[in-house]
Image (cartoon, coloured by chain):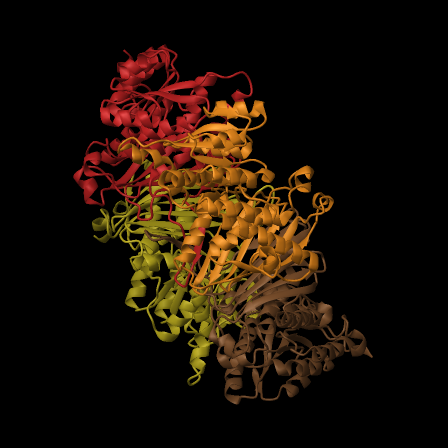
Chain colours: A red, B yellow, C brown, D orange
Amino acid sequence: MVSSMLARAASLGMRRGLATAPETVKVGIIGAGRIGQVHAKAISGMQGAEVVTIADPFEKFGKKAAADFGANWTPNWEDMIADDNIQGIVIGSPTPFHAEQIIKSAEAGKAIMCEKPISNDLATIDKCLDVVEKTNARLLIGFQRRFDGNFQQVREQVQAGAIGEVRMFQINSRDPAPPPAEYLANSGGIFLDMMSHDFDQARFCTGGEIEEVFVTGKAFEEAAQEANDLDTVLVTLKMSNGSFGTIGNSRRCAYGYDQRIEVFGSKGALSSQNRAPHTVELSTDSSIANALPYSFFMDRYAAAYTGVMAAFVEMIRDGTAPSVTGADGRAPIVAAMAAAKSYAEGRPVRLSEVDIVDGASQSSAQA
Amino acid sequence: MVSSMLARAASLGMRRGLATAPETVKVGIIGAGRIGQVHAKAISGMQGAEVVTIADPFEKFGKKAAADFGANWTPNWEDMIADDNIQGIVIGSPTPFHAEQIIKSAEAGKAIMCEKPISNDLATIDKCLDVVEKTNARLLIGFQRRFDGNFQQVREQVQAGAIGEVRMFQINSRDPAPPPAEYLANSGGIFLDMMSHDFDQARFCTGGEIEEVFVTGKAFEEAAQEANDLDTVLVTLKMSNGSFGTIGNSRRCAYGYDQRIEVFGSKGALSSQNRAPHTVELSTDSSIANALPYSFFMDRYAAAYTGVMAAFVEMIRDGTAPSVTGADGRAPIVAAMAAAKSYAEGRPVRLSEVDIVDGASQSSAQA
Amino acid sequence: MVSSMLARAASLGMRRGLATAPETVKVGIIGAGRIGQVHAKAISGMQGAEVVTIADPFEKFGKKAAADFGANWTPNWEDMIADDNIQGIVIGSPTPFHAEQIIKSAEAGKAIMCEKPISNDLATIDKCLDVVEKTNARLLIGFQRRFDGNFQQVREQVQAGAIGEVRMFQINSRDPAPPPAEYLANSGGIFLDMMSHDFDQARFCTGGEIEEVFVTGKAFEEAAQEANDLDTVLVTLKMSNGSFGTIGNSRRCAYGYDQRIEVFGSKGALSSQNRAPHTVELSTDSSIANALPYSFFMDRYAAAYTGVMAAFVEMIRDGTAPSVTGADGRAPIVAAMAAAKSYAEGRPVRLSEVDIVDGASQSSAQA
Amino acid sequence: MVSSMLARAASLGMRRGLATAPETVKVGIIGAGRIGQVHAKAISGMQGAEVVTIADPFEKFGKKAAADFGANWTPNWEDMIADDNIQGIVIGSPTPFHAEQIIKSAEAGKAIMCEKPISNDLATIDKCLDVVEKTNARLLIGFQRRFDGNFQQVREQVQAGAIGEVRMFQINSRDPAPPPAEYLANSGGIFLDMMSHDFDQARFCTGGEIEEVFVTGKAFEEAAQEANDLDTVLVTLKMSNGSFGTIGNSRRCAYGYDQRIEVFGSKGALSSQNRAPHTVELSTDSSIANALPYSFFMDRYAAAYTGVMAAFVEMIRDGTAPSVTGADGRAPIVAAMAAAKSYAEGRPVRLSEVDIVDGASQSSAQA
């Protein structure tokens, strides 16, 4: 639950403070942009953790962010990784840098938190995860929805057997409006950019692995058409546990940010409602009206982002294993590749068809 | 809306009674079973309409039903159709009799209301509809969900442009428990028996025609396995208006009868909630609990069934065209056939592949 | 529950039809107005019951209603009561006639269903109930809300102990708009005319008797001011079972008819939501909008009115005691009188202060 | 809205950081207990503000809290107030110290945030506010519910005219379980201890002043009986704007913490629902179950508490007037005194009867 997560975040230091003074967990952040600041703020709000350094090539922004959080600034992330005083690295840089920064951090013995995706290239991911494995590094992938109280509740109840055998599921995930054209042009496509979160949710909430996908989709709006992308997609998934379900994505949602999941089983169903900033109902002669949901994912997932950092700090401090692993970061990329192929070929595609490790091309990859 | 429908049903006679006395609409019913009784009761509750005769081969049941509604009984439906005093025929017999009874009623100049399906055989349907067309008969198909306030509201708002361009939709339709084995063995399979209602809803609520289906499904329980059928199916549909969506069916739903639709468009979404007998919430130390939904489709659609009969009586009295036509009865059968083929072949199937009139096989069929 | 009530209404005749043919319950209705027609329609829709005669002094309306329901018309209700063929009398005439018609019906040995109130004069009520008692007549009072699925559910769960000891309750009851001026002028005031239903609900849902009331109220609108009445009142009630609560009434409710109750106890709370014709939610860029509730009490309580008649027919047929007694009809009148006194004097008033039987004035009344 | 409040809290420093470096707002906190830690944590999580000193007589707790937030500890709050480096004082000490600490802080020219109540003694409050006025001190009272997104939304929409003229309102406020006996014995009674928050809500949400109260109440449980207090109370309020309403309080609520308000007006109603940690619905064969609400007020109002501190820091930095004034802190105390008198005397009591300034006793108080 959100509350327990927040409470845990809040109490990290408090609890320890009752015994002998704990060492403060020291974190370095790569990237002074929006997500880097979110993480810096979360760590600053925790007792028992601090942001030591923020690395960003742009001096103006880097210095400002560092000042805001009482941290040092460096233009050079490699220097920061080399700093023995820093125990954990938060990677909030652009995607093309992720793999190299993970590898260097792992080789330097740091705990690592990396925003998704590790890479949009499967071979690069595998090379990266190989280093992580060989160095025994602990890598936490930033699928923040896994730290949202609603989705955690769904997973917990599914695992507790509340709905019996999982049979069907529906994931709805809609953005208020398409991103800018330049972003769209380099997003990697809707399956990688947007649906990868939902592929992760399908695994997280149902407890199965994705085995096959079938895509129906369309570019209803010019923005997607010009980017040679789709803006509305509906994917059918077959899972390894025998269940099947759909993910529906839309780049446009008039009423705001919409994130819901329903899991249906032999003994019942779990359904997470969307979230709104308040729960005030206005009844007039025209309707019984409720609040619009959040219109921005960072508002919607504010508590979840704090939860990610709390988990990261806890992982460093207590030496625990990451709760969202490199393999969890890899799986949605394979699903996205299969989805793109399904759309292109108009047929169901098994993930083994596109996976260079587990599938048909495995032998050559490992030869 | 349900209320306006009921009000209309109630006022059929009242309104007319203010002018010169109208003639009472006289109806004959084929079949004294459950659905025949539901229709007889609905007509009895209307001013300006009466059940004159109930035809059923089983004397005991036929006589009892006739007595209950102040009607005559006959074992011979052909006699009843020949009765000049009767204006409209309600066909509530087993499916194999539908086509012949429609044809005979049409030839006798009767208004006809027939339970779905007309037939599970496309050639039979087409032959039947051919007679209906040639005789200028008016045939109303009993898709009662079209008379449910929720689904009517969805359709009306979609047509009024409340959500802009229709892009995606989700239909959930779940039965509390599988029917008896003997029923299942002769049901025609889940696509014909259960999903045909939902195929109709997809057309009714989105305003498009089904062009392609892709099926994922499974028999989770023995009942379906033994009947060589599926009990849980998820179908992706592409519609002629460019939208696409899913229908999810389950023969087993622990919490009762579950019937919902969500239609998503460029300007918003319409979402019909499931219905429960009451809206009392019980808050205790274990949960905030709401009522289970209806557990039986005849309770859930009680008002809708009354609405069907009100429409039928109005159609007879006012000479209006049927609101649910023979073509509406035919379309879901084609979709069900395509769905069965999609499941068998594991690929998306266009309806034109299975349709003997509009599709690839048309020429041979009409040669 | 509504569904079970409807089912019961529907099956009255069906069940019996399986045995030897039952006698049809024969009912006479006084009053061909709106409520008389509602009751006539309900009886017509039941197997095993019929409306034999409708009494109304206005020939045009009386004849029309009689024709609509296949009944006889008489201008003289006393003749109807004298008809040995009629077993039950439904009294839907104006209030001033109720008491006399109850008395005559009781003396003629009829089962009686009377709309509330028996009278707005306590002495008249007591005289009337005295005859009912002496003749062993069975009198059912038409508090239709007791037959609503929501309120029944609240009562049943309270009695089943679902919320433990009852401690507080809130009843909200709001009308869409004030009645016409001429109606208001003769309504007897908001406490008798409108809140008497809610006083009954307080007793029905909590299981206690009203002992004391305290009123805050106001005439916000001209209509009430001109009628020397209030349009918005808030009453605090102390009950005999130790619980206390409020009733809030408003003659004006912008969003429609609003009827809710919350009962709070040591182990939880029961809360009945308002009811709307459909449950379709429209999400747009301006709100998440749900349907307006019913705007007319006869739509809101359509099933409840049917339930009243089903109970009446069952009471006649099976010889059971009435479920809403003359005492139930009397109690809200006493509460309304106390409420009027509380408002006039600006202080809490015990019901014993105004009751001519149980309270301070009892001795003189019985001397 | 919560989100905008959090965003504002988050951005306090960020915005300013873009210009010349702002001075950090420096705060001292009196009291290292639960509420002091909540406020310390909130300030620590804001850029542009810091906790400089925490004053608490208990060395162990004071030192620990100081260490947790990187602040100094002092056993002597007067020293802290004398510290020129500190701009704002947060008073989180036991109630008997509030007035003196406010006075000393005011005289030292500090901005002040004080937990409610200023005092339970009206003369003490007035003496304190007199100093505040004369020193032009800015005093913010910690009614945290005013910073809750739900209640803010109600107030904003009422003020915007969304429901027209305010006519009636209902405030429900229920605690999960009674506090410990020793707390109850010294709480000042349910009206001061618990309902003062709701009296404030009545003023905040309706925009009127409380003029009269009438109380019905009871001690259902031993805990309250032994403390010579009530545990369940229902108060009717008349407001200066012509509206009236109720507040219902219970020390026991089986399903958790329950805080709701409904405001009803000439054009509609606003209704704030209770809040729960998640919005996942579990449908099984026994119920459609939603999450229990929060069970602890600090979880329920976590964002609101952050909002209070954000407002305080903003008030210091920007020199704005406090949004919750000393007069706002005073008014609920008068209402609570009137409520106690109403219960004792069993009659409605006007606030002027108990107020030493505005009411009947005003002359003697000011002579």
User: From where the camera sits, is residue B115 visible?
Assistant: no
Viewer-closest of B33 and A183:
A183
Which residue is pictured at 41% across the width and 37% down the height? D313
The image quarter in which residue A235 lies: top left
User: From where the camera sits, is residue D152 visible?
Assistant: yes
Give the left or right position of residue B356, taking residue C293 as reference: left
- Horizontal and vertical percent for residue A360? 29, 20
* For residue A286, above or below residue D80: below
* For residue B226, above or below residue B71: above
- Horizontal and vertical percent for residue A198? 35, 34
Give the left or right position of residue A231, taking residue C129 as reference: left
Viewer-closest of D203 and B240:
D203
Residue furthest to the left: A226
Total label count?
Answer: 0
- Horizontal and vertical percent for residue A285? 41, 63
Which residue is pictured at 69% across the width and 41% down the height? D185
Which residue is pictured at 65% across the width and 62% down the height? C237
